[in-house]
Amino acid sequence: MGKRIRVDKLLAHMGLGTRSEIKRAVKFGLVQVDGRLIKDSGLIVDPDSNEVKYDGTPVVYRDIVYFMLNKPQGVISATEDSRERTVIDLLEPNDRLRDPFPVGRLDKDTVGLLLLTNDGQLAHELLSPRKHVAKTYEALVQGEVGDDDILAFKGGVTLDDGYATMPAELVIERREQRDDGVYSSISLTIMEGKFHQVKRMFEAVGKQVVFLKRVSMGALVLDESLLEGSYRELTDAEVELLRSHKRTVE
């Protein structure tokens, strides 16, 4: 038996109205359960075994939600803020109803992959320092990134607060000469998530990150068809990938 829930709560959670509006909809004959009109908006149903229709359209109940967001610059990784625009503000009203939250954080000026969910257990597993979930970033770095930096990152570097990072994989994609010096495009995979970690790692070797984008977290890879600021639900396969990864990083 699945989760049992009141019809009015189920429909309200799916964004079809307030409890009082659902009650009126039931009164006007707009709600069916297993092909029959219902008269009680408080009727208990099992979303896994009962078919619920609203105005003739089947309602698929989702208790847990997973969204992949391509975070833009200028937005903070928080659920609410009195002054700043948050990643939750980017969601459609119906998608906010089940209170998703960002799994981890990206700096305000960092773009790229951010997972939003209300699956607290999965979020805990992905963020736990003991799990060492890999996160891959693409960055533009002011300065000539070279083999010495690859070796330094491979052995772990010491940040400004004395913290020694875990080994990280640095790949140099290309270098270009500009009027104000050399810039390096790189890919970096880290196994932890300290505050401003990527930027601070490059500062530790005398260089500055001028653009940063996260492209993967664990088994989840950013859908490059998503424009910055847009999002989509994860596919069932992507959710299972995250869950299976969670089980293998013990």
Image: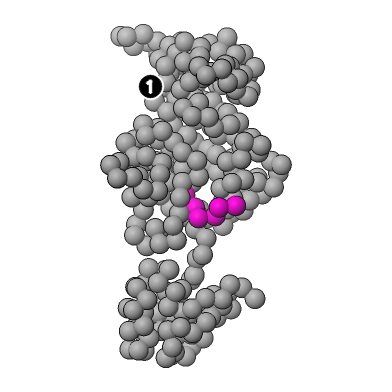
For image coordinates 47% across by 10% down, the residue present is 206
| Whole-percent x, y for residue 246 in the image | 65, 46
Residue 41 position by quadrant: bottom left
Residue 193 appears anywhere in the view: yes
The amino acid at mark 1 is Val
Q: Which residue is situated farthest in the left direction here?
A: 83
Q: Residue at x 38, y 22 (%)?
A: 210
Where is residue 208? Give x, y as percent. 42, 16
Percent of width and height locating residue 43: 49, 84
In which quarter of the view is residue 237 placed?
bottom right
- Asked if residue 120 lies in the magenta stretch, the reply is yes
Q: Measured from the top left, where is residue 77 in percent x and y?
A: 41, 41
* Disc 1: CA contacts within 10 A as few (<14), some (14-19) or many (>=20): few
Q: In the image shown, does 249 or 196 lie closer to the viewer? A: 196
* Quarter containing the C terminus: top right
Left/right of residue 185 with respect to residue 132 in the rendered view: left
Which residue is denoted by mark 1 in the rendering?
A: 210
The magenta region covers 116-121
